[in-house]
Amino acid sequence: MPSDTHISGLMLWEWRSQAQKSALAADVSPREVDWLLQALTGLDRLSLRLDSFKTQDVDLKVSFLELQQLWQRRLEDRVPVQYLVGLTAWRQFTLKVSPAVLIPRPETEELIDWAIAAARFDSALQTGHWADLGTGSGAIAIGLADALPHATIHAVDQSQEALAIAQHNAQNLGLSDRIQFYQGSWLKPLDFLKGKLAGLVSNPPYIPSQTVLELEPEVVNHEPHLALDGGADGLDCIRHLVETAPDYLRPDGVWMIEMMAGQADLVTDLLKQQKRYDRIITHQDLDGIERFTIAHLKSVS
């Protein structure tokens, strides 16, 4: 059994077949085997799907033994495959991730689409200041910078470790000159932008504290609880953003957040009680879950 980084495609194919079987037995998606191989080889999705790599030698970024050990960690320790390779795909980007940041989910990609839709006929949103609060890996800030090339993006996180990863991702994607990063709690580092934000976007912690402890082991044992735990009812952070955002948004500025299933009516009520928002709309994600609430700060009459 080779331990170096150059092996035959047939040997890799045999390992892949066994790994996929072990995935099914462990209630893990067998597709994760290919995600691991794409990250650790030069193979693409098509060659893996067609098994065309069987007849060629394959170079690994780690030794074959390390590949096997990584897969065992996925099955036995339930470490997310994204953390094993330190990368994840999100929109059209490849982002660095670590246990210091939440793994960006596919549904969060839709927040960028809603930001694009909001800005389509509003020049102030196209060219103004946007804040990504709780940026984590920097995914939302990067998505905004890419989608709104004439806007200025401000990314905030409480974790210095998370900010380092976000800054790395922005630099790696050539967007570091478009995004400014700040360490601190929510809007506090942006006091100099009070009354000037065109848009505020956040995927805040929104899971009730007790529910966090009941999540699958991949999440509860490996992802940062700081990015998950939204307090007793899951709404602590959202409640704070509802209350503080009006001091920072410009008139007609847009407020956008992601939330969990079942929170839409509560979030709408919080916004209405504040009496400073209008055009409050909730949108479903691609799975039909009420996932995003968008509101605008009332114009000065």
Image (spheres, grey):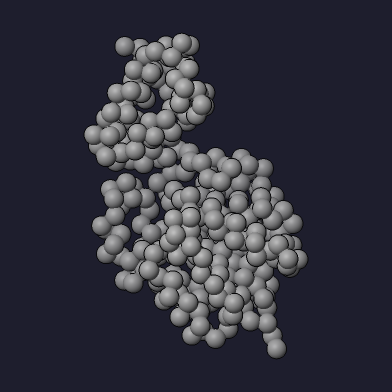
Residue at 42% x, 40% y is 82
Task: Return the residue found at the far bottom.
Answer: 301
**Residue 61 image position (x, y, % from top left):** 47, 23
Evaluate whether residue 168 shows in this view. no
Residue at 38% x, 53% y is 224
Q: Looking at the rendering, which quadrant does residue 121 occupy?
A: bottom right
Between 209 and 24, the one nearer to me in the picture: 24
Q: Looking at the rendering, which quadrant does residue 179 occupy?
A: bottom right
Would you place residue 131 above or below residue 23 in this image?
below
Residue at 47% x, 77% y is 268
Quadrant in which the N terminus is drawn:
top left
Evaluate whether residue 178 shows in this view. yes
Query: Relative to residue 287, is residue 208 drawn left or right?
Result: left
Would you place residue 222 above or below residue 230 in this image?
above
Would you place residue 139 above or below residue 95 in this image?
below
Residue at 36% x, 41% y is 80
**Residue 264 image position (x, y, % from top left):** 44, 71
**Residue 11 image position (x, y, % from top left):** 37, 14
**Residue 226 image position (x, y, % from top left):** 39, 59
Between 112 and 88, the one nearer to me in the picture: 112
Would you place residue 56 above or below residue 236 in this image?
above
Disc tally is 0
Query: Relative to residue 73, is residue 243 drawn left or right?
Result: right
Between 33 and 72, the one nearer to me in the picture: 33
Quadrant in which the C terminus is drawn:
bottom right
